[in-house]
Image: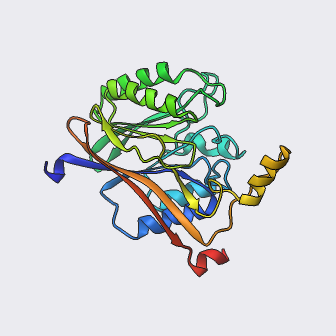
Amino acid sequence: MSDDKIIKILFFGDIVGKPGRYAIRDFLAAKDYSDYFVIANVENASHGFGLTEKNYNELSEYGINCMTSGNHIWDKRDIFNYIDNASKLLRPANYPAAVTAGKGSFIFDFNGVKIGVINLLGQVFMNLVDSPWKVVKEEILKIKEITPIVIIDFHAEATAEKICFAKYCADLGCSAFFGTHTHVQTADESIINNMGYITDAGFCGAKDSVIGMDYKTSLNRFLTSIPERYEIADSSSIQINAVEVAVNKDTGYAVAIKRIFCSSNETEEEKSQ
């Protein structure tokens, strides 16, 4: 298939704090990704919880075209001051109708190609939200009236829920499905019924950590059951977890998928900031 028939999607797993933001910055600067539609889950980008406007603007400058989120999207107070004007940012579409701030899906125009993206929360072991099953069907049908390319970030805890929901989305004609939230990249990338799939894309941040957070803080919470503020891990090694999917522009079918896992040491400049 000729390259002019293909649109490339690059999806980054949950960005965790400053190490994750810098990892994304350096990864995107190392190669020309101008022909990739770049998506990143940003709900942990600002010190592990939520997203500030400053960090939203920072990530936009790095070349991210769409930012998805999850259950931590509301953790920073200033989110309500800017989310309605943040054209790249999505919050889960299946929050109750009373939640009017932000948008849960959007059709992006990228290099002349229209790409629909939907962000959803799972229900198992998660916050109380509306059914993602009903919402996703409605959103997919609306998007497919305009474009055959539909991308989903399903922010969920339970593996079984992610797998079953993904199969449902594949039956509805989705192009790519990325699970997020658990911060551990799964080795099950595949194409299901013409849809690129991975149960969890993983995370971008400090490699020597507990899913991006400081080990000792995490350990104390498990040993004592006493709430303690999580801190971002201070690590000289950072990791990138991402997934590439190639999609046919005309059909919306995924034709290739590749999982990315890489790590590197931070520069002295980054350590000093």
Image height of 204 relative to 153, above or below: below
The location of residue 272, given as percent across then percent down, is 66, 78
Q: Colour scheme of this structure image?
A: rainbow
Q: Residue furthest front?
A: 223
At a point 61% along the width and 73% down the height, the residue shown is 236
The location of residue 2, given as percent across then percent down, is 13, 51
Q: Residue furthest left?
A: 2
- Residue 94 falls left or right of residue 166: right
* Residue in the foreground of this view, choosing between 191 and 109: 191
Image height of 131 relative to 226, above or below: above
Is residue 172 in view from this perspective? no
* Residue in the foreground of this view, choosing between 88 and 122: 122
* Residue in the foreground of this view, choosing between 131 and 82: 131
The quadrant where residue 92 appears: top right
- Residue 272 falls left or right of residue 89: right
At a point 63% along the width and 37% down the height, the residue shown is 71
At a point 50% along the width and 30% down the height, the residue shown is 160
The C terminus lies in which quarter of the figure? bottom right
- Residue 252 falls left or right of residue 156: left
The location of residue 146, given as percent across then percent down, is 30, 30
Q: Residue furthest bottom?
A: 268
The location of residue 74, given as percent across then percent down, is 67, 40
